[in-house]
Image (cartoon, helix red, strand yellow):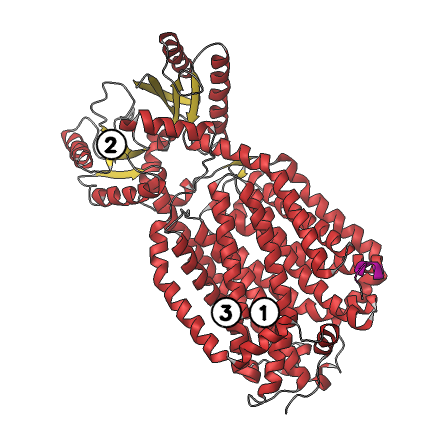
Amino acid sequence: MVDTAQQPEERQGRASTGRAPIGQRWGEFVARHRYRVIVVGLLLALGSAALYPALQSKLVGVDFSVSGTDSSRSDALLAKHFADYGTEQLAVTFSSTTSTTADAAFRSRVTAVVDDLRTSTDVVSVVDPYQTQGFAPQISRDKTAAVALVGVRGDASQRIGVAERLQERLDGASRDGITVAMTGYSPMTVDLTRVESADATRAESVGIPLALLVLVLALGGLVAGLIPLISTGFGLLIAFGVIALLANVMTFDILVTTVASMIGLGLGIDYSLFIVSRFREELARRGVTTRGDTEAIRRSVGVAMATAGHTIAVSGLVVMIALASLTIVDVPAVRTISLVVAVTIVCVLVVAWTMLPAALAALGPAVDRVGLPARYRPADARPTDESSTRGSWWARWARHVMRNPWRYAVAGVLLLVICMIPIGSIRYGVDIGTAALRDQPSGPANTVLSQKFAAGTISPITTVFTGGSDGGQLSDSQAERAVEFEYGLRTDPRVSYTYSQSNDGRSLMVVIPAVAIDSTDAIELVQSIRDKAATMTADGGPRAYVGGTTALVVDASDEISGKMPWVIVLILGFSLLYLGLVFRSVVIPVKAVVMNVLVTGAALGLTVAVFQWGWLQSVLGFTSAGYIQVYLPVTVFAVVFGLSMDYEVFLIGRMREVFRRDGDSDAAVVDGIEHTARPITAAAAIMVVVFGAFLSADVLELKQFGFALAVAVIFDAILVRMMLVPAMMTLFGSRNWWPGHR
């Protein structure tokens, strides 16, 4: 059958502008050139697949450095005046259950490994545990373990390769009952890359099959269910190719590919689901039953892109607006995550606007093959006479909420506000992932250090003393004050030991914390050292620049917490402006922003309760560190705000279609809920499955990301879209669409 009647959306678009909407024209253009579009997409995907291995080899540790801070200046002074110390200190441990450090075999093994390490061009210095003359405690009290301190050269990216090369040297070094292992920030980064990759693979192996099941149930067939997964897979593959190219000119950390997969899968499947759902609805309306009905198929693709395609474009732009706001935070970890997620969203959107409509045009009614029995298929995807004979539960639910708008509005808002309460006690820190590395090469070394030595040996606190804020040389009296300062720290129970050296008229003090470098005690130790140093400087003493991994975390926390209000203001401001232009309304953007803030706040609140307070830690398989990952709140706020807007735009966009056509606000609300509830529920279920699967991760930050995003989606899909939106739309009536309601 050839379709000759224009659907309401087509008539409305042509009547108002004289031309079909751009989305419809684009969709029909892609449908006409479908096979060419598919071939180009396949070539891009193949090229991206070839680039992916190179990306994995270029990832570095998460970078928390903030330019102009104490920690960054300390690192710069360290590199300039104390090159022999190295840009990073690694620890190589030797341990045994059958011999002691006094045995000749033990000493011989240590000497052989130390001598071999000294021949490496990557190594600046090695402190042999037998040659310290008591300078530093590098032999355990029970004489069963020793540790060699290895200074290496190179920047953050280069040190990843250094760690890999040194680990290759140490492979096979364990013998005669003596275990040799290496740890440090860079070796742990290498291992974390491996663990996070395994976490992502495990999560995807659970999430993708469950997502397919939800898609099949939501769309009523296997072929229709597979299409969003395949489309998203192409989008992710192309995104990784783009990121691999960018990695040639900038640095990306180990977290980016996992976060890109997590968010890209959730959003990409959602976007594709909305388009496929609308395409099948259009096919059913036109009664298309054969692939030969090319004109009707082409128009169905056009309407799907003019409606659902337009919606996902608006949603994607809102997410990118939110992510762009993160660029004001001067922390590379935050900026790289925002960039990578933005690139991923652009790529899944491009695929959803090119390869997906091309595939739908090629399939036509074959999209319904391997379908479920008719009674289990979506009503919109059945022939008109079949779907019209069945009542809609969603329509009845919408009318029920509309009859009791105040009750549902107050209850929904109150619940979200209660969930936000824990945010008031939020604390920042960084879990470096030690617990997840037990079975990795650095695991044995971490265990030896924590049980036999000072836990802070992994990454000491480094303090450079200079003659003033210009980094000049110390005077004799200032040098004496620096020595006194070091001696004073040795009485602190959080300090295991200290040592110092002088060069170029400056002094370097190295503090080995007795506590784990990612603990709240270590953070408080850094703050205490800085407070005491500031008092000394104010009294005419030397200027102290405190650095090291823990100090980086403290500075990053200050930067993020200081910029968080501005990030929120920018996200809210730009979102209000953009949604106002899209919907030509004042009320709808304000409501959308307020509800999204409530959802985001509630998700962060529960994340604090679970991961900082320790709720459900035995159920989820982790031990609370007493804080939230430093970059998580600001990143989650931007991402969740954008994700929440996804459903808002889809639902309100459908309501606006009906209101512009009929002028009946109540009918628009009912129609919007009725026709979007199933895809929104399915999309939310998919996101919850994908994000929730990361709760199985060994790396704590992945658990936190997955939990926060999954909870936000649950709140958004159930409380907001199914309760607050119909309630609020009813309360405001036709005022929702002022001033451009007709």
Distance from the alpha carbon under mark 1 to that under mark 3:
10 Å
Q: Is residue 391 above or below residue 505?
A: below
Quadrant including the C terminus: bottom right
- Which amino acid is tagged 2? Val
Q: Is residue 234 magenta?
A: no
- Quadrant for the N terminus, please: bottom right
Q: Amino acid at mark 3?
A: Ser
* Disc ID at residue 231: 3
Please name the residue that numbered disc 1 is placed on: 273
Q: Disc 2 designates what residue?
A: 124
Q: Tell me the magenta residue range.
A: 733-740
Q: Identify the residue shown where x is 51% and y is 68%.
A: 351
- The tag earlier along the polypeptide, 2 or 3, is 2
Residue 174 left/right relative to 658 = left
Q: Earlier in the sequence, mark 2 or mark 1?
A: 2
Upstream in sequence: badge 1 or badge 3: 3
* Mark 1 crowdedness (10 Å alpha carbons): few <14, some 14-19, many ≥20: many
